[in-house]
Amino acid sequence: MQVIVPTSAVVPPSETGPVTHLYRAATRHGWYEMAAVQSGGLALSWVIGVLGATWAELYDSASTPVQLDDPIFLPHLNGERTPYLDPSLRGAWTALRSGHDRSTLLRTSLEGVAFTISEAVNALPGVAGRVDHLRIAGGGSTAPSWRQMLADVLGYQLRAVHVLAASGRGAALLGACAAGHVDEHALPKLLTPASQPVADPDATRTDLYAERRRAWRQVLEGLRQTTTTHPASQPANELRHDP
């Protein structure tokens, strides 16, 4: 999962700030900054495999009520990129009790991924306080209950683009441009498909998720102290300029 925001300025990376990735735009006009979530869809695929669930069951679980004493799920099964750039970070389910069932585990796995996406969004300087909505595409973005959970956790209105395979469409348009079939100046409009609002944050649930997220972050930081290493040579950010 990636969160991307266009930018016209190249800002030197901070040695102490969250890890993001800066790339030159394919059209050579501008740049884009990306927050990369390494443990999103992969972690959810692992969850449904372990619990013997379907994707439909997983997404349906997002509509069940939020409970403050539910388990905490950390989805970082293979480390994480934004905002930590920490390959040794690991996942966990904590605060389990006998009253928790399969549906609870499914819902909290989605919640943990949503919190991870929220961390990525907040790491991008071009998002927080500067936009009033986020666009979503691909994967599970068509599931209404998952959309609503994301909106409640992120605190932004979500708008779905009218193209399910947005990445494939973008690649095809760039290929057509390279082959001379599409004028480069027409790409910005063609690469911005129409969108429509699909979920608005609910204030009550947003407050509950904010409290849950504070507990989630405490568990995350506690786990990092016991499982991660921080080599002096590890970069705090990645700046990449593709020719």
Image (cartoon, rainbow, N blue to C red):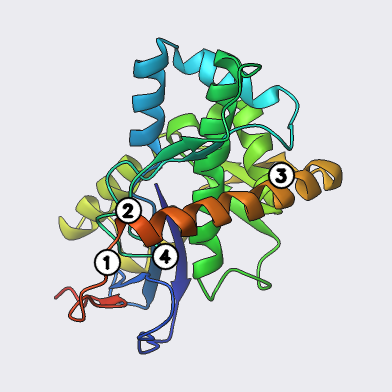
**Residue in the picture at 66% in, 37% down:** 149
Q: Earlier in the sequence, mark 4 or mark 3?
A: 4
Q: Earlier in the sequence, mark 3 or mark 1?
A: 1
Q: Are marks 3 and 1 in contact (CB under 8 Å)?
A: no
Q: Assign a secondary structure to mark 1.
A: loop
Packing grade of label 4 (10 A; few <14, some 14-19, many >=20) is: many
Please name the residue that numbered disc 3 is placed on: 152
Please name the residue that numbered disc 1 is placed on: 26
* Residue 191 appears in the picture as rendered: no
Whether residue 101 is situated above or below residue 33 in the rendered picture: above
Q: Assign a secondary structure to mark 3.
A: helix
| Amino acid type of the residue tagged 4 in the rendering | Pro
Front of the two marks 3 and 1: 3
Quadrant of the image occupied by residue 51: top left
Whether residue 105 is situated above or below residue 166 in the rendered picture: above
Q: In the current view of this chain or complex, which residue is farthest to the right?
A: 204
| Amino acid type of the residue tagged 2 in the rendering | Leu
Q: Are marks 4 and 3 in contact (CB under 8 Å)?
A: no
**Residue in the picture at 80% in, 50% down:** 207
Q: Are marks 1 and 4 in contact (CB under 8 Å)?
A: no
Quadrant of the image occupied by residue 95: top right
User: What is the x, y in percent for residue 94?
Assistant: 52, 36
* Residue 61 appears in the picture as rendered: yes
